[in-house]
Amino acid sequence: QSRLTSNFTRMMTWAGEVRSLQVRANADTPHDALMARDFGAQGIGLCRTEHMFFNEERIFLVRKMIVAENDKVRDEALKKLLPIQRGDFTEIFKVMDGFPVT
């Protein structure tokens, strides 16, 4: 876990005064987005949705969806995954507070 020091904050302030580019982060989860904002990112340049499903509970649902033997089982898994993904995006957009997410 990284933490911001006063020296880092001072350096980033100086850099911000003369920069001509925006810095965007790769962030796939609300936690990643929060860290990116903490470190001064001005948006998310790459949000890979498949990475949202890597934790143990979520990957089980993805695997269930992929290997489903029929549409009913596949649809059941997708119905559980959709609110998870929507929730993650809702939190990412809240954290980014108007900054771009692509």
Image: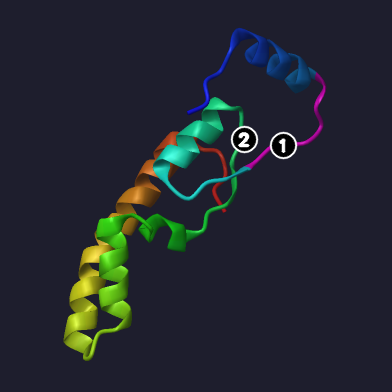
Q: Nearer the viewer, residue 96 or 4?
A: 4
Task: Check the image and name the residue furthest to the bottom.
Answer: 70
**Percent position of residue 34, x then y:** 46, 33
- Which quadrant of the structure image shows residue 16? top right
85 on left or right of 38: left
Residue under numbered circle 1 = 22
**Residue at the location (70% across, 19% down)?**
12
71 on left or right of 93: left
**Percent position of residue 11, x then y:** 72, 15
Secondary structure beneath dot 1 equals loop
Q: Which residues lie in the magenta part?
A: 18-24
- Classed neighbour count for the residue bearing mark 1: other residues with Cα under 10 Å, few (<14), some (14–19), many (≥20): few
**Residue at the location (43% across, 47% down)?**
29
Residue under numbered circle 2 = 42
Total labels: the figure holds: 2
Instruction: Tell me which amino acid carries mark 2.
Output: Gln
Residue 47, relative to residue 74: is it above or below?
Answer: above
* First in sequence: mark 2 vs mark 1: 1
Instruction: Tell me which amino acid carries mark 1.
Output: Gln
- Which quadrant of the structure image shows residue 6? top right
**Percent position of residue 84, x then y:** 28, 56
User: Residue 54 has which mark?
Assistant: none
Quadrant where the C terminus sits is: bottom right
Q: Nearer the viewer, residue 59 or 70?
A: 59
